[in-house]
Amino acid sequence: MRSVIAGCGGYLPARCLSNAALAAEYGLDTSDDWIVERTGIRQRHIAAPGETASSMGTAAARQALERAGIAAEAVDAVIVATSTPDSAFPATAVRIQQQLGITRGFGFDLAAACTGFVYALGMADSLMRTGQARCVLVIGTEIFSRILDWSDRGTCVLFGDGAGAVVLTAEQDSDRGILSTHLHSDGRHGDILLVEGGPGSTGGSGLLRMAGKEVFRHAVSKLAGVVDEALAANGMGHADLRWLVPHQANLRIIEAMGKKLGLPRERVVVTVDRHANTSAASIPLALAEAAGRGLIERGDTVVLEAIGGGLTWGAALLRF
């Protein structure tokens, strides 16, 4: 049994904030040149006051379902990767169920920071391989603008808001679909990228803190390792890859990964310049854009990879 991507969707808030506008609005000692040189980011989208993780996730899911030609009533499960849920509970996934009019099946949230979508894809694939679901919505949705310290130029310039979704359907003996997922975490490095306190048991401000150089140091080696792990598990090498759809955190990390895999720039999907880092939403947003433009075609071998707070990291290898 294979989990095949039947449709991809994305949603970005209407408000688009350029680097220059961000610096002016928040009185930051930074500039467009400084941000672009270090990150590749030129702008980001910011959620409106009335928007929520569930409303954005619902919009992305609707587009994915429409592109797949599948009715919401056919969905057996909704899995949402988010670090910015609507509330501690109920889960954002069940709110999306309600907004889509789904009254059957089940839904739950998953927290693995920027690696969340890859984790959620792995959970969905496991459910489908064991026959517990035949149609699953996997959604990454984030409103990081509400957990940023807007006086900290080292973090607030990096993130944006958005949502992405895929519809997975179960197909027997298909040559397409998810080939394997590979998930890792190492809690020893949990303090280099975290949200202090928040709605949980520790209290606190609930703002994001990051040791950027430490995160960067771990990123390329761990990502390269997990991609090679995925390829080896399927008897493949770098030459078998058609596309890299990476987590969109930093252009330098993305370019370094492309070079390690021997992929030309045009085979690496890049949206970080326009979306910034949308955490768990970044990969499905990038996938939806590439698929919507007809860049990724049926039968292409694609690798997804991400690293995030925890530290967590992972990869998924699939045939589109």
Image (spheres, rainbow, N blue to C red):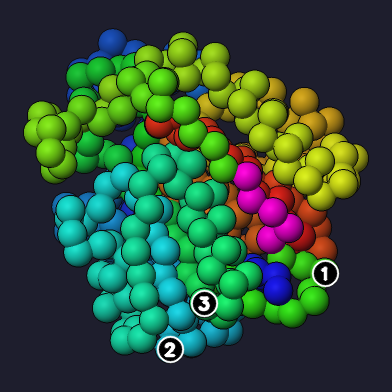
**Where does label 3 land, which residue?**
132
**Where does label 2 land, which residue?**
73
| Residue neighbourhood size for the residue with mark 1, other residues' Cα within 10 Å, grouped as few (<14), some (14–19), many (≥20) | some
| Residue neighbourhood size for the residue with mark 3, other residues' Cα within 10 Å, grouped as few (<14), some (14–19), many (≥20) | few
Vertical arrangement, residue 191 with respect to residue 247, above or below: above
Query: x and y percent of residue 135 in the render?
Result: 54, 78
Q: Is residue 50 left or right of residue 271?
A: left
Q: Nearer the viewer, residue 260 or 27?
A: 260
Q: Nearer the viewer, residue 315 or 36?
A: 315
Residue at the spot 20% in from the left edge and 28% down from the top edge = 196
- What's the residue type where badge 3 is placed? Gln
Vertical arrangement, residue 282 with respect to residue 248, above or below: below
Query: x and y percent of residue 177 in the render?
Result: 71, 65
Eye-nearest disc, 2 or 3: 3
- What's the residue type where badge 1 is placed? Asp
Q: Nearer the viewer, residue 61 or 170?
A: 170
Query: x and y percent of residue 47 in the render?
Result: 27, 50
**Considering the image in quadrants, where does the C terminus appear?**
bottom right
Q: Which residues are magenta?
A: 178-182
Vertical arrangement, residue 192 with respect to residue 234, above or below: above
